[in-house]
Amino acid sequence: MNPPQHAPNGDGTAERNDSSACLTACLPGWDVRTVVPVPVIGVLPGEGIGPEVIDAALTVLDAVASATGLRFDLRRGGAVGTGPRRRLTAAAAEFCQSIFAAGGAVFCGPTGGRAVYDLRDRFDLFCKLVPIRPAAALRDAAIVRPERLGGIDVLIVRENVGGLYLGKFGRCEAGRAAYQHLSYHADQVTRVADVAARLARRRRGCLSVIVKAGGVPEVSALWKECAEAVGAAHGVSVEMLDIDNAAFQIIADPRRFDVVVAPNLFGDVLADVATVLLGSRGMSYSANFGPARRAVYQTGHGAAHDLAGSDRANPTAQILSLAMMLRESFGLWSAADRIETAVENVLASGLRTPDVASRESRVVGTRALAGYIAAEAGTRAAQERERA
């Protein structure tokens, strides 16, 4: 096997040649990276606040590209969902397929309805990774007491193409009854548990598996059997937690968690609960991964239609998902680091959107916050380029 490679920076310096440090190194087929001179990024605007936070993130990308000389092939798609339940459109599916075929990644704004589930199912994006690391700069605006936020580093691994969300559903008895089927196959559980265990082995060696033993006994038993076998194979400790207890513990004692793996519904709920630690859902970002290096990067929050067009939405999660994409799909460590540092510095300066503002903050809008982050990221990149 050839060693992984990364494309050079625009300033001629090499990116970190260490794909093993990427989260995606624990995914099947993601351990070897090839040089990508011009990364292909497929942009889907989403709905609600989606177009606004996507434009904000692309402002940051433009600043980094201008300062470093990096080039990106941006290709724009249209609406993701259509119809009463906003199912995935054929055009969006074809667009994503073309991006994956070109070796690119999809950068998607918040999307509602069934489209997001259809997209994951269509491309077998079986693994969703949600990092939970509270920003030190936001402790003054935290819902949780600031002294309880230090040292939190949780990675939630959510099974993404099975379970209740992808079960058959419908109505019967002339619409007076509704059903939704919950099922899992051992292969589905094992492959996502294997990713989680590999991640845990690289971190602190602890894997928490979220179930509901009394409420969904057979599915929970299957998850327990598969997770314990995978954990033993990788030499990590495995604990089983019921979802209600886990939701309490992740707020009351978040430092007890290392890597968390959960079925689709439980992972969704727990990741949303954990945003309390971040100070706002607007700080939560994530990515969906599948075979053949397919990836869709998005926020961890919804479309927030009530905020659409108000210039009040927090673009930080979309910007952080951009940094995640640059690192995980394209190996652009330096660019990702610059963006993350810029976010931290701007928030630490007191510039905030309303959802994370403290008494001492200067409240700004979506576009303004993105502009400050872009300026900070671009300045740092230019300085590094000059030093090189």
Image (cartoon, rainbow, N blue to C red):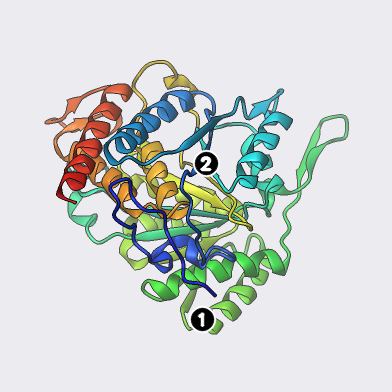
95 and 288: which is toward the camera: 95
Question: Residue at the location (15% across, 30% down)?
Answer: 361
Q: Is residue 272 visible?
A: no
Q: As displayed, is residue 267 above or below residue 98?
A: below
Question: Residue at the location (73% across, 58% down)?
Answer: 183
**Image location of residue 64, percent across then percent down:** 31, 38
- Compute the Cα span from label 1 to label 2: 35 Å
Q: Is residue 363 left or right of residue 174?
A: left
Name the quarter where the N terminus is drawn: bottom right
**Dot 2 surroundings within 10 Å: few (below 14), some, or many (20 or more)?**
many
**Image location of residue 83, percent across then percent down:** 71, 23
Task: Write down the residue under mark 2.
Answer: 40
Q: Is residue 227 left or right of residue 60?
A: right
Which picture quadrant has residue 173?
top right
**Image location of residue 247, percent across then percent down:** 44, 55
Marks 1 and 2, the one that precedes in the sequence: 2
Which picture quadrant has residue 147?
bottom left
Task: Write down the residue under mark 1.
Answer: 234
- In the rendered image, the residue lying farthest to the left is 360
Q: Secondary structure at mark 2?
A: strand
Q: Is residue 197 left or right of residue 13?
A: right
At label 2, the amino acid type is Val
313 and 209: which is toward the camera: 313
At label 1, the amino acid type is His
Question: Residue at the location (67% across, 70% down)?
Answer: 222
- In the rendered image, the residue lying farthest to the front is 12
Question: Residue at the location (44% across, 30% down)?
Answer: 54
Q: Is residue 280 visible?
A: yes
Q: As displayed, is residue 201 above or below residue 375?
A: below
**Dot 1 surroundings within 10 Å: few (below 14), some, or many (20 or more)?**
some
Question: Disc 1 vs disc 2: which is toward the camera?
Answer: 2
Q: As displayed, is residue 36 above or below residue 97?
A: below
